[in-house]
Image (tube, rainbow, N blue to C red):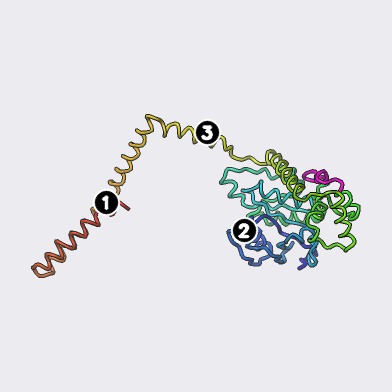
């Protein structure tokens, strides 16, 4: 569906990164939201001032027969940035206009993660905006970033995030001779997943020939690509992200262990904790115990005054009621 600006925008991201929530906020629709991956796996369309779309592989590769996105909004989970940036940088290397919507910032802050958005934007070469779809924060800024990107204020990065060409130089060069508008990274996908692309039969034969002549190894190329991306992502995070030092957490834990598990003082600490625990249990339980004992005492007096004197009354008051009270009075100590 075309929005008022006459453009299509693809909303993409890793599973469980907040795509559906952001889609609903931007379009006013109510796509299903869930706390597990794969809730939204098909294409969904909607219109906003800018617009929204949930996309699949063919859409981002511009091979979908119905949708040709003018811009990709990549939803990135800030609390799991390293994993999300892998997919994000792959999309950036397709040489399409990209805007990054940074979600889960509150969760990242609770985990002690601090993100320098300006530095992250500089390292990725695309617009980065923090959003909170549940609270409606950052939506206007996101729309503005989309508008500026579509107007060309944010240029598509000329340099690849990693050196994709070096992964398979000869096959990539030959693919680009056949398809002049193809990026280095898309050329790799053409060689790896050519059945997903819509190309004329003669071009398909050429791609097959290039793969065989260049001895293109898809598995090896993909593995090398992932290793290089994660290495580059680590560099980006060093520049733009401040995370709690796991070594410091380990040191604090070790210091506590050195005291609490000491060969001599550890036993004393354990006995002190157990003593205080039992004392607190008895102290706190005393109040409900007194209330239970008083309640059964009042009930016994009430029944004695109203029931005739005899063995049945004695059994009920001094047997059943007294026995039940004697058991229940200890319940607070165990609860």
| Quarter occupied by residue 135 | bottom right
Task: Write down the region rendered in magenta.
Answer: 159-170
Q: What is the crowding at mark 1: few (fewer than 14 residues within 10 Å), some, or many (at least 20)?
A: few
Q: CA distance from mark 2 to mark 1?
A: 50 Å
* Horizontal arrangement in the rendering, residue 201 relative to residue 281 (left or right): right
* Horizontal arrangement in the rendering, residue 278 relative to residue 138 (left or right): left
Residue depicted at x 25% and y 53%: 330
The mark found on residue 287 in the picture is: 1
Looking at the image, which is closer to me, 210 or 115? 210
* Horizontal arrangement in the rendering, residue 66 relative to residue 240 (left or right): right
Q: Position of residue 10 (x, y in %)?
A: 74, 60
| Quarter occupied by residue 33 | bottom right
Residue at image mark 2: 37
The mark found on residue 251 in the picture is: 3
SS category of the residue bearing label 1? helix
Q: What is the crowding at mark 2: few (fewer than 14 residues within 10 Å), some, or many (at least 20)?
A: few
Q: CA distance from mark 3 to mark 1?
A: 43 Å
Looking at the image, which is closer to me, 185 or 152? 185
Circle nearer the N terminus (3, 1): 3
Looking at the image, which is closer to me, 205 or 239? 205
SS category of the residue bearing label 2? loop
- Position of residue 183 relative to residue 267, above or below, is below
């Amino acid at each position: 569906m075309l929005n008022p600006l006459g453009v299509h925008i693809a909303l993409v991201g890793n599973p469980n990164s907040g795509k559906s929530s952001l889609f609903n906020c931007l379009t006013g629709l109510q796509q299903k939201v869930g706390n597990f991956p794969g809730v939204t796996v098909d294409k969904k369309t909607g219109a906003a001032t800018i617009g929204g779309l949930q996309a699949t592989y063919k859409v981002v590769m511009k091979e979908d027969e119905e949708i040709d996105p003018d811009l990709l909004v990549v939803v990135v989970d800030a609390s799991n940035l390293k994993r999300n940036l892998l997919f994000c940088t792959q999309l950036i290397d397709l040489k399409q206009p990209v805007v990054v919507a940074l979600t889960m910032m509150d969760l990242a802050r609770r985990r002690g993660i601090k993100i320098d958005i300006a530095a992250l934007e500089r390292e990725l070469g695309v617009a980065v905006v923090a959003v909170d779809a549940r609270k409606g924060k950052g939506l206007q800024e996101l729309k503005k970033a989309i508008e500026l990107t579509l107007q060309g204020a944010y240029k598509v990065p000329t340099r690849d995030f990693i050196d994709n060409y070096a992964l398979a130089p000869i096959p990539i060069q030959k693919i680009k001779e056949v398809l002049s508008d193809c990026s280095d990274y898309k050329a790799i996908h053409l060689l790896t997943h050519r059945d997903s692309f819509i190309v004329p039969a003669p071009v398909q034969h050429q791609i097959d020939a290039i793969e065989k002549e260049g001895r293109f190894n898809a598995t090896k190329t993909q593995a090398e690509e992932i290793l290089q991306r994660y290495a580059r992502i680590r560099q980006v995070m060093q520049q733009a992200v401040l995370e709690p030092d796991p070594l410091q957490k380990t040191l604090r834990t070790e210091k506590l262990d050195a005291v609490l598990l000491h060969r001599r003082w550890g036993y004393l600490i354990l006995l002190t904790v157990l003593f205080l625990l039992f004392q607190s249990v008895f102290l706190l339980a005393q109040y409900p115990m007194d209330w239970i004992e008083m309640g059964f005492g009042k009930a016994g007096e009430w029944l004695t005054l109203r029931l005739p004197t005899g063995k049945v009354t004695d059994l009920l008051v001094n047997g059943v009621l007294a026995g039940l009270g004697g058991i229940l009075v200890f319940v607070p100590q165990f609860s």
